[in-house]
Image: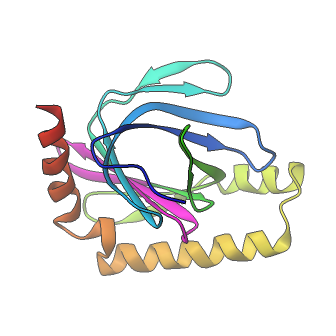
């Protein structure tokens, strides 16, 4: 699987474990793309929910996807700092249609001071019963939450101080 080429626009599609489309981001600019990592950016992009509702993202965001990690990271540039929203998810796949992943409900929200909170545990429990998540999946997801928390605490990858700023500067070269 080759990744998308830098500078191109890609759609991002999020699914649920049962195969149902969950959410679609209409357009993100690819900043880096290979078979292991895709880094994209968007600002005021149209998002469509599974029920047809739509909304626009409010601020510039840098999105980090990895083909072997069970999470993705969105760094949102706000006036008071960088906020991160981390989806606990399957590794991404990329085809000519879109970048795709399965959303597993759990999320980690990280604040500019690098404190964080785990969200949506109740939704995860409900969906794990409704969609019959295998026990091995629960262990994989819990292990990857631990990896994600280590990255946050160590300021690794997208959490390093310069990561979001450097990729945002690259994004601006495609916009103007």
What residue lies at 37% left-to-right and 72% top-to-bottom?
152
Residue 81: x %, y % from top left: 20, 51
Is 96 or 144 nearer to us in this picture?
A: 96
Is 165 or 118 nearer to us in this picture?
A: 165
Circle count: 0
Residue 145: x %, y % from top left: 56, 72
Q: Is residue 171 above or below residue 153?
A: above
Image position of 126 (left or right of 168): right
Q: Is residue 172 above or below residue 69?
A: above
Is 55 or 19 nearer to us in this picture?
A: 19
What residue lies at 34% left-to-right and 48% top-to-bottom?
40
Image position of 21 (left or right of 35): right
Residue 37, image quadrant = bottom left
Quadrant containing the C terminus in the rendered view: top left
Residue 57: x %, y % from top left: 37, 30
What residue lies at 81% left-to-right and 46% top-to-bottom?
18
What residue lies at 26% left-to-right and 38% top-to-bottom?
60
Magenta stretch secondary structure, dominant: strand
Image position of 162 (left or right of 84): left
Within the magenta stretch, is there residue 24?
Answer: no
Residue 79: x %, y % from top left: 16, 41
Is 124 or 140 nearer to us in this picture?
A: 140
Residue 109, image quadrant = bottom left
Quadrant containing the N terminus in the rendered view: bottom right
Image position of 12 (left or right of 40): right
Within the magenta stretch, is there residue 84?
Answer: yes
> Bounds of the magenta span?
63-85
């Amino acid at each position: 699987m080759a990744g998308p080429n830098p500078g191109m626009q890609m759609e991002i599609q999020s699914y649920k474990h049962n195969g149902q489309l969950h959410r679609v981001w209409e357009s993100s600019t690819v900043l880096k793309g290979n078979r292991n990592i895709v880094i994209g950016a968007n600002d005021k992009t149209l998002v469509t929910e599974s029920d047809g509702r739509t909304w626009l993202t409010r601020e510039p965001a840098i999105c980090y996807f990895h083909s072997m990690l069970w999470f993705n990271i969105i760094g949102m540039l706000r006036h008071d700092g960088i906020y991160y929203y981390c989806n606990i998810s399957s590794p991404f796949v990329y085809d000519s249609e879109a970048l795709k992943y399965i959303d597993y409900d759990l999320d980690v929200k990280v604040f500019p001071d690098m404190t964080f909170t785990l969200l949506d545990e109740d939704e995860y429990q409900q969906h794990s019963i409704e969609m019959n998540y295998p026990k091995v999946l629960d262990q994989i997801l819990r292990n990857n939450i631990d990896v994600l928390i280590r990255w946050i605490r160590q300021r690794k990858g997208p959490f390093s101080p310069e990561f979001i700023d450097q990729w945002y500067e690259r994004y601006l070269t495609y916009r103007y």
